[in-house]
Amino acid sequence: MTYPTNDHGVPQFPKGDARRLFVLVAAIDVLERPTLTTLAEYTGHNKGTIPADVGKLVEQFGVELVKDGPVYRVESWGDVLKKNSMRKFLRG
């Protein structure tokens, strides 16, 4: 199935789809300064849902994410998710 993409070419998976989380963690990894605003603009996700989605990545997938001021970064991908696999979700 093909999903629509935003202006950055990022697929817009439906709400509740785990791939939305994968897009988010990949965006945190690739963006130069991943803040709530830049993540929302790049991924198409609502700014208000990003903190909860970050929590899901930590709790459900064991990803270690650090927030230094307004900027997020991936400290560890954990045992489940793999960096290169997650980056593929940015392009569908």
Image: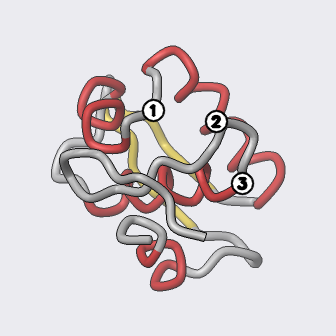
Crowdedness near tag 1: few (<14), some (14–19) or many (≥20) residues, C-alpha within 10 Å: many
Residue at screen point 28% across, 41% down: 34
User: Can you identify the residue that label 3 sits on?
Assistant: 18
In the structure shown, which secondary structural element does the residue marked by tag 3 occupy?
helix
Name the residue nearer the viewer: 67 or 81. 81
In the picture, measured across the screen, residue 16 lies left or right of residue 19, that is right
Q: Amino acid at mark 2?
A: Asp
In the structure shown, which secondary structural element does the residue marked by tag 1 occupy?
loop
Crowdedness near tag 2: few (<14), some (14–19) or many (≥20) residues, C-alpha within 10 Å: some
* Numbered-mark total: 3
User: Can you identify the residue that label 1 sits on?
Assistant: 45
Q: Residue furthest front?
A: 1
Q: Which label number is shown at residue 91? A: none
Q: In the image, residue 38 lies at what x, y percent? A: 24, 33
Q: Amino acid at mark 3?
A: Ala
Q: Residue furthest right?
A: 60
Q: In the image, residue 20 lies at what x, y percent? A: 59, 49
Where does the N terminus fall, quadrant-wise? bottom right
Residue at screen point 43% across, 62% down: 26
Q: In the image, residue 6 lies at what x, y percent? A: 29, 46
Q: Of tags 3 and 2, which is closer to the observer?
A: 3
